[in-house]
Image (cartoon, grey):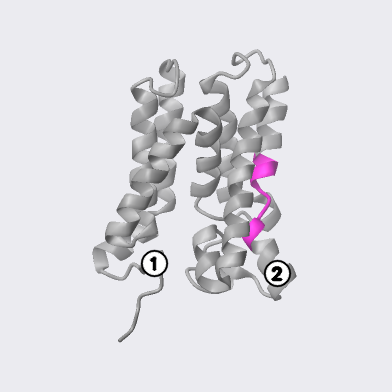
Amino acid sequence: MLSLSLILICYLLGSIPTAVWTSKVVYGFDIRTQGSGNAGATNTFRVLGKKAGIFVLLFDIMKGVAGTSLAFLPDQIWQAGSVQGMMLLGLATVLGHIYPVFAGFKGGKGVATLLGMVLNIHPMAALICVGVFLGVFILFHYVSVGSMISALVFGSLVMAGFCGPADAATKGLAILLVVLVVFTHRSNIRKLSEGREGKMYLWKRRTA
């Protein structure tokens, strides 16, 4: 069945460990051994700096865009270009990013790849989610909090039909994606509760 092949392709696409390969090839070490130990854009910014961070962020976003684009192929499970199809393939891509077969199943938290999926499904919804993320991040300086709240906003938009017709399967996928984002941030939630979560800033803080 075509859908199973596309799901596998999306998982493999998501499994491209951008941060891991960038750190190993360019800098000579595995980024998962430094910083938070996460193989995502946030830790790349912290450990390797802006240039590497921007590259990893954009590449991981494009994984989500590319994966959901395959939903425009006609299939027995979804109508070509449907929200349900894009979310299903987007979920497979995000799972690949979180559990990459090419990096020992230890990847990132899937937020950038999820953003790519949302961008392809509904650009305005993506803009809203980015706006919410930036607002929360600027106020509290926690990437994790901004990411989780943005995921909740996206799930709410899908449930409300803002992103297109939302049947029971589509709503179920939206809930699953939100739960997945919260699950991948469980260590951040624990650190937040203990007051140990690291802050980040859009601009360097000036010192007197």
Secondary structure that dominates the magenta span: helix
- Using residue 20 as the reference point, say whether residue 173 is left or right of it: left
Q: Which residue is mark 2?
A: 24
Q: Residue at x 58, y 72 (%)?
A: 48
Image location (x, y in percent) of residue 53: 57, 62
Q: Quadrant of the C terminus?
A: bottom left
84 and 112: which one is in front?
A: 112
Q: Horizontal placement of 194 versus 111: left or right?
A: left
Looking at the rendered structure, the kind of residue marked 2 is Lys
Tell me: 43 left or right of 75: left
- Callout 2 secondary element: helix
Q: Which residue is depicted at the point 50% across and 42% down?
A: 115
Is residue 37 visible in the rendered structure shown here?
no
Q: Is residue 78 magenta?
A: no
Mark 2, Cα crowd under 10 Å, few <14 / some 14-19 / many 20+, is few
Query: Which range is magenta?
Result: 11-19
Above or below, 134 relative to 38: above
Q: Which residue is mark 1?
A: 200
- In-image side of 85 versus 144 (left or right): right
Q: Which mark is residue 117?
A: none
Query: Which amino acid, mark 1?
Result: Met
Rendered location of residue 51, percent (x, y): 61, 66
Q: Earlier in the sequence, mark 1 or mark 2?
A: 2
Calculate the distance from the C-alpha at mark 1 to the C-alpha at mark 2.
24 Å
Q: Are marks 1 and 2 in contact (CB under 8 Å)?
A: no
Image vertical order of residue 19 relative to residue 158, above or below: below
Q: Nearer the viewer, residue 123 or 41?
A: 123
Question: x, y (%) of residue 93?
Answer: 60, 39
Above or below — where is 140 with respect to 47?
Answer: above
Whether residue 82 is visible here, answered yes or no, is yes
Quarter of the figure with residue 150: top left
